[in-house]
């Protein structure tokens, strides 16, 4: 008779602690008291636990639940769209999803990870991860992980979007319309720490692509036209970030004739500021958003770089399912292409700017 391999739960029972605590000890993530750590380490030896792929492959019991960690599902429609896509694909495969918002807080994220471990979800999807330590805990607990949009560690599946292609398309569109005073309102790289996996962060990709496009067009870079900060206010998802940046741009002696916004919520605030400044869009100001979430609901309808949100969620779940069914599968990074959707908020450069 073949003996059953020891599991994480066996270690937890032997040590008299939770699976989450065992995962913290094995991954060296989060605080664990010295006495508890010694108990866990002794239990690992006592039950003969070996966290290898063969043992993981023997796991047959499933909760048919996928944990999904997000920043804040109500702050930016992007996260709601992705979550809905994950849930739709999960339901079609007999799974349910368990959502947890971390609000860009690493401690809150770790708390959510611990809840997922205790509930024995079959895999965890991050949109997006804050702390690599949270991923390490899940890896120690032998749970498949998929990272969406940002990649903190290289040892799990990831589904990303080609942000360079998105900004290049937006800039090409505005340059073709004759614009040269093009402003950029986006995320501040300093507020979104670089994960270390890729050469540049998402924010750096977008900002540098904008700057590179100006250089190629022979346009001098004006620092006054670059405004960086948060995308939305997490407390209420309001558009005050875009509104404030736009007010500052419109106060310039030589204001921009076009603006690229890092998300559609930012663009909504820019439209509000433009209305108050008696600037007509697109007659006086052209505006391009990013995400294509609320673009069709704004007035005028917003030209926006559409992120493939449904495909992000679908691909993430499929990668999670593949790892559930085959724990030996190698991590994959899938990069999806965005699409520029041209609507009513962009037009030719104003006549005054061409004189």
Image (cartoon, helix red, strand yellow):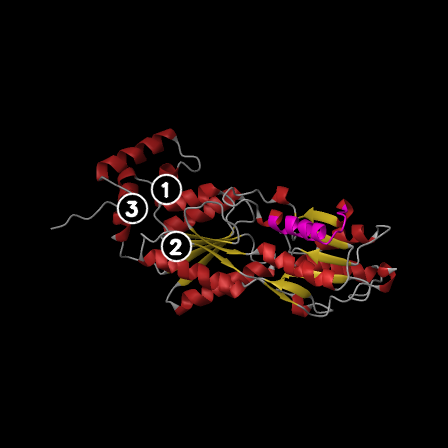
- In the image: residue 11, left or right of residue 85: left
- Separation of residues labelled 3 and 1 (CA atoms): 10 Å
Q: Nearer the viewer, mark 3 or mark 1?
A: 1
Near-viewer residue (221 or 271): 221
For image coordinates 26% across by 41% down, the residue present is 50
- Find residue 23 and name its label: 1
Q: Position of residue 303 (x, y in %)?
A: 68, 66
Residue positioned 24% across, 45% down in the render: 6
- Identify the residue shown where x is 67% and y is 60%: 170
Categorize mark 1 by other alpha carbons within 10 Å: few (<14), some (14-19), many (20+): many
Mark 1–mark 2 CB contact (< 8 Å): no
Q: Nearer the viewer, residue 134 or 292?
A: 292
Q: If the image is split into quadrants, where does the C terminus sit?
A: bottom right
In primary-sequence order, the first of circles 3 and 1 is: 3
Whether residue 112 sits left or right of residue 16 in the image: it is right
Disc 1 and disc 2: Cα gap in Å?
15 Å
Q: Give residue 123's mark.
A: 2
Q: Main secondary structure of the magenta part?
A: helix
Magenta-highlighted residues: 205-222
């Amino acid at each position: 008779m073949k003996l059953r391999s020891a599991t994480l739960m066996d270690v937890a029972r032997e040590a008299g602690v939770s699976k989450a605590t065992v995962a913290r000890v094995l991954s060296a993530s989060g605080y664990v008291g010295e006495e508890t750590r010694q108990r866990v380490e002794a239990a690992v030896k006592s039950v003969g636990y070996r966290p290898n792929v063969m043992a993981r492959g023997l796991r047959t019991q499933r909760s048919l639940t996928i944990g999904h960690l997000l920043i804040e599902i109500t702050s930016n429609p992007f996260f709601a769209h992705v979550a809905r896509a994950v849930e739709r694909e999960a339901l079609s495969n007999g799974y349910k999803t368990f959502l947890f918002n971390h609000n860009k807080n690493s401690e809150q994220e770790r708390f959510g990870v611990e809840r997922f471990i205790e509930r024995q979800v079959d895999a965890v999807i991050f949109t997006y991860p804050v702390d690599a330590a949270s991923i390490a805990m899940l890896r120690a607990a032998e749970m498949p992980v998929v990272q969406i949009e940002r990649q903190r560690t290289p040892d799990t599946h990831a589904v990303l979007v080609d942000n360079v292609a998105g900004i290049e398309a937006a800039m090409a569109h505005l340059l073709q319309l004759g614009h040269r005073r093009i402003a950029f309102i986006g995320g501040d790289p300093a507020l979104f720490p670089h994960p270390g996996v890729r050469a540049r962060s998402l924010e750096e990709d977008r900002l540098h692509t904008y700057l590179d496009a100006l250089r190629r067009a022979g346009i001098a870079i004006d620092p006054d036209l670059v405004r960086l900060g948060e995308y939305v206010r997490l407390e209420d998802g309001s558009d005050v970030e875009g509104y404030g940046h736009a007010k500052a741009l419109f106060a310039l002696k030589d204001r921009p004739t076009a603006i690229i916004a890092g998300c559609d919520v930012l663009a909504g605030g820019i439209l509000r500021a433009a209305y108050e400044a008696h600037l007509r869009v697109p007659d006086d100001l052209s505006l391009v958003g990013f995400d294509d979430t609320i673009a069709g609901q704004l007035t005028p309808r917003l030209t926006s770089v559409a992120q493939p949100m449904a495909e992000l969620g679908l691909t993430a779940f499929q990668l999670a399912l593949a790892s559930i069914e085959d724990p030996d599968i190698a991590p994959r990074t899938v990069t999806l292409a965005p699409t520029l959707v041209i609507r009513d908020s962009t037009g030719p450069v104003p006549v005054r700017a061409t004189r």
